[in-house]
Amino acid sequence: MASMIARSARIATVTGIRHVARIGAISATTTTTTTTARLARPSSAMNKTATRFFSVSRIARDDQPRLRLGSTAPNFKAETTEGAIDFHEFIGDSWTILFSHPADFTPVCTTELGAFAKLQPEFAARNTKLIGLSANGLESHADWIKDIEEVSTGGTKFNFPIIADADRKVAYLYDMVDHQDLANVDKAGVAFTIRSVFIIDPNKKIRLTLAYPASTGRNTAEVLRVLDSLQTGDKAGVTTPINWVPGEDVIVPPSVSDEAAAAKFGEFKAVKPYLRFTKYPEQILKK
Ligand code: BEZ
């Protein structure tokens, strides 16, 4: 029975929001039930005590999906500050940056959202959508956005949706909670860390994952740089070296023979037989 319930919980976590109520029903007579039901409660209820979440963490540790590079980004439906979305429909034919926050009105996160809003035109120019997530409701998000516009967008109107994930369902679906799960909360009951970044491609595959501590603001330029590297690599069949930025030489991957490299790129420089550089493939990228 226990393994059946664990399996049911896993299915629900992977397939998303609609199934949570069903799980509660399945496990209604068990200890697991109680914990599963708590998982679906809004964060205001969660903030009351840290200790009641100990059993939630047991579920989370076993059942959060292990998302890896190349995994299909789990689909979900959610309310956002720009309306309800089906995540895969939202992605459509674009690249997507999904990044998350444990709570509204947190200082580091306030600076990050403003910085992403300022850089949004650069992402849009790369056929890339931004979407934030924070573990509070829509009303709170709307108030927070006013603060973000006041203090950290530099006059830019806030320009992308933030998912309202008050019950942390999406945070669990994307394995965003740290190893101590919901037992690890600060004095205000904010769960650590839910500070992840995912780059997802138009095929809905996860291409980058980053997890940040609460204390360290993210680096928007680095997110943009990785996006440029991935898009360059996909289009030109190259890889990019340490600290690369667009315009700099790229690497011919080992899967390409010298003959094929000469045919495709013209000149290349072999520093070692396995380390070959060629010029930024501008012509290929323009096609
Ligand atoms: C922040 O400063 O953004 C923050 C504070 C507590 C937890 C996570 C983030």
Image (tube, rainbow, N blue to C red):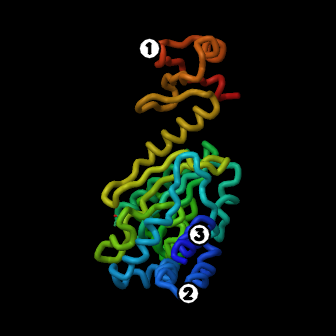
Mark 3 highlights which residue?
80
Element type at marker 1? strand
Question: How far separated are the C-alphas under marks 1 and 2?
Answer: 63 Å
State which quadrant residue 109 falls in.
Answer: bottom left
**Depicted 29 relative to depicted 152: above or below:** below
Mark 2 highlights which residue?
28
Image-based side of 89 in relation to 184, left or right: right
- x and y percentages locating residue 108 in the rendered image: 35, 61
Mark closest to the chain's N terminus, 1 or 3: 3
Image-based side of 206 in relation to 179, left or right: right
**Depicted 113 relative to depicted 39: above or below:** above
Element type at marker 3? strand
- x and y percentages locating residue 21 in the rendered image: 61, 81
Q: Residue furthest left?
A: 187
Where does the N terminus fall, quadrant-wise?
bottom right
Q: Between label 3 and label 2, give the one nearer the viewer.
A: 2
Amino acid type indicated by mark 1: Lys
Mark 1 highlights which residue?
272
Where does the C terminus fall, quadrant-wise?
top right
Is residue 33 in view? yes
Amino acid type indicated by mark 2: Ala
- x and y percentages locating residue 36 in the rendered image: 51, 79
State which quadrant residue 57 falls in.
Answer: bottom left
Mark closest to the chain's N terminus, 3 or 2: 2
Mark closest to the chain's N terminus, 1 or 2: 2
Question: How far separated are the C-alphas under marks 3 and 2?
Answer: 30 Å
Amino acid type indicated by mark 3: Thr
Is residue 157 in view? no
